[in-house]
Amino acid sequence: MIRAGRVDPYGPTLQTTTITFLEVSGTLTGVKVRDDESFEKALRRFNKFCEKTGILSDYKRNQHYEKPSEIRKRKAAAARRKARRARLLEERRG
């Protein structure tokens, strides 16, 4: 959920506008809109922050319960893909 704080009709200030995101673990993460910054720029900064910290990918991964056997299968498949990629790269190098 992305929520914008109260917007001042005379322009955003540090105290009035905040873009927040409720992280999966329950902690609140956000960026404050600076006085000389547009809301769109702050939203871009927020999206970059979420991408960098992996909040959205963590949320998507935890949307549904995954059984321990499914976790093992997913990790084994990822390891096989990584090994195959490394083997192909090594063959190309010669």
Image: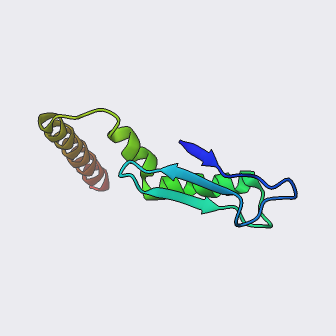
Q: Where residue 55 appears, x then y in whole percent? A: 43, 51
Residue at x 50%, y 58% (from the top left corner): 29
Picture colour scheme: rainbow
In terms of image quadrants, where is residue 31? bottom right
Q: Is residue 59 above or below residue 50?
A: above
Question: Toward the viewer: 69 or 84?
Answer: 69
Residue at x 25%, y 48% (from the top left corner): 82
Q: Where residue 59 appears, x then y in whole percent? A: 39, 43
Residue at x 76%, y 52% (from the top left corner): 7
How many circles with numbers are drawn on the protein? 0
Q: In this view, does 35 lie above or below 92?
A: below
Residue at x 20%, y 46% (from the top left corner): 79
In terms of image quadrants, where is residue 41? bottom right
Looking at the figure, which quarter contains the C terminus? bottom left
In terms of image quadrants, where is residue 62? top left
Q: Where residue 24 appears, x then y in whole percent? A: 38, 48
Query: Residue reaching furthest left?
Result: 69
Q: In this view, does 72 lie above or below 31?
A: above
Does residue 54 appear to the left or right of 39 in the view shown? left
Does residue 3 appear to the left or right of 89 in the view shown? right
Q: Where residue 70 appears, x then y in whole percent? A: 17, 34
